[in-house]
Image (cartoon, grey):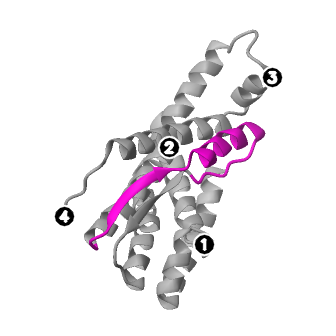
Amino acid sequence: MNVSFGTRELFDLSVAWVALGVAFTVFLQRDLRSALVGGLAGGLPSGLLAAAGRAFALSMITVGIGFLLHELAHKVVAIRFGQRAQFRADYGMLLLAIAGAFAGFLFAAPGAVYHRGRITARQNGLIALAGPLTNVGLAVAFAPLLFSPGFFGEVGTLGVGINLLLAGFNMLPFGPLDGKSVLRWSKVVFVLTFVPTAALAAIGLFVVF
């Protein structure tokens, strides 16, 4: 299996990763959001700038990696089934994510992996399922950091919470979300995956907020 990336695809992945990092930084840092919305005539206080840098690093490690590996899981499984697959960023939705963060809410749909070729409903369902299951796996990977002190503890908390939320959200059976493809393939598999991921997403919501 040959997994390769084109120049545009790498660019789109990089832009989406950074844009999500910025959006979550603004969303998580209320003081930064207020300062940016209010204007920068007096500049940003050094303490606020340091907090913003910390939040950006935190967002890139947790949200960014959660998004990146979710999409790469789709791509790898699609290629495994003989598909031609590439990620494409949705620049309009990325701008909406950043603008929404300034307004105090966050909705992130940074793009998607598009694949083509002959495929069965089962294969398409498995491609869709790979993303949410990857997020569950990442939540497990971040879990040992939950009780660590300082920055590593923050990485654990946000890493677990965000990845559980991503898994549950993407399993919703609506629009372009992964749950719709899984449901189209198998109602039994959908129920067996949606119920636990929805429960885990509720836990993730509690962990993050």
What residue does disc 4 label? 1
Q: Residue beneath label 2, please?
A: 16
The residue at which mark 3 appears reads as 38
Q: Evaluate if marks 1 and 3 touch, with contact meaning CB atoms under 8 Å apart.
A: no
48 vs 7, left or right, is right
Residue type, label 2: Ala
Q: Nearer the viewer, mark 1 or mark 2?
A: 2
Q: Alpha-carbon distance for marks 4 and 2?
A: 26 Å
Q: Quote the CA–CA distance across marks 4 and 3.
A: 52 Å
Instruction: Please say if the residues under marks 1 and 2 sit with CB atoms less than 8 Å apart.
Output: no
Q: Label 1 to label 3, Cα distance in Å?
A: 37 Å
**Sequence-earlier tag: 1 or 2:** 2
Q: Which residue is mark 1?
A: 172
Instruction: Of the two numbered discs 3 and 2 on the same chain, state the one appearing first in sequence.
Output: 2
Badge 3 vs badge 2, beta-carbon distance below 8 Å: no
User: From the viewer's perspective, is the residue at label 1 or at label 4 nearer?
Assistant: 4
Where does the magenta region start and end? 81-109
Q: Is residue 92 magenta?
A: yes
Q: Is residue 149 visible?
A: no
